[in-house]
Image: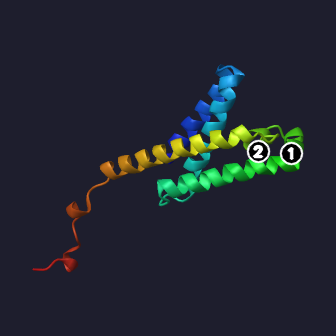
Amino acid sequence: MAGVAAALVVVAGLGARAALPPALGGPAGDALYATLVVVLVVLLRPRTAPAVAAAVGLALCVAVELFQLTGVPATLADRWPLARLVLGTTFGAPDLLRYAAGAAAGWVLCAGLRAAGRRRAPSSGTRLRPARDRQT
C-alpha cells in the first residue's frame, strides 16, 4: 500500500507544479516532496511508526534544503536535470515550513495506511495453532 501511496504522491506533486500557478504549485510541490520522503521511509522500513517516519522525513528534507547552500545541487542539476527534482537548486527558508506541513501530512497518511492494514489483517485470536502446540 505504501508503494501505491508513494506513486500517488509523486503524481500529485508533479501535477501540482504543472497545473497550478507557480505561487500555489511550488509550495504544494514542496509539501508533497516531504510527504513522499515520509512514505519512502515507511516503504524502506515498514515497521517504522508514522511519527518516527515523519521526523526522519522532515530531517532528510531539511538536510537536502541546507545542502542547497553549498551550490552542489545546482551543479548536479545542470549536469543531470532529474537531480533538480530530488535535490532542488537554491535554498529557500519558506521551504522548511512547507516540508514541516508535508511531513505532517505524511504522518497522517502513514497512520491511515497502518490502520487500514490492521483492519485487513486477520486478528491474532483467530489464528489456528499447529496440532503439536494445542493442549488436549
- CA gap, disc 1 and disc 2: 9 Å
Q: Is residue 11 left or right of residue 124?
A: right
The percent position of residue 6, horizontal first and vertical second, equals: 56, 42
Look at the image and tell me in which quarter the C terminus lies: bottom left
Image point (75%, 47%), residue name: 65
Q: Is residue 68 left or right of residue 22?
A: right
* Label 1: few (<14), some (14–19) or many (≥20) C-alpha neighbours in 10 Å: some
Asked if one can make out residue 95 in the rendered structure from this viewpoint, the answer is yes
Reply above or below: 126 against 64: below
Q: Is residue 133 left or right of residue 19?
A: left
Secondary element at image label 2: helix
Q: Which mark is residue 76?
A: 1
N-term mark: 1 or 2: 1
The percent position of residue 87, horizontal first and vertical second, equals: 76, 45
Image point (69%, 23%), residue name: 23
The percent position of residue 72, horizontal first and vertical second, equals: 87, 49
Seen from the viewer's position, the closer of residues 134 and 100 is: 100
Reply above or below: 38 against 12: below
Indicate the amino acid at tag 1. Answer: Leu
Residue assigned mark 2 = 87
Image point (58%, 31%), residue name: 12
Count of picture labels: 2
Image point (74%, 39%), residue name: 85
Secondary element at image label 1: helix
Indicate the amino acid at tag 2. Answer: Leu
Reply above or below: 14 against 93: above
Seen from the viewer's position, the closer of residues 127 and 98 is: 98
Asked if one can make out residue 1 in the rendered structure from this viewpoint, the answer is no
User: Do labels 1 and 2 touch, CB within 8 Å?
Assistant: yes
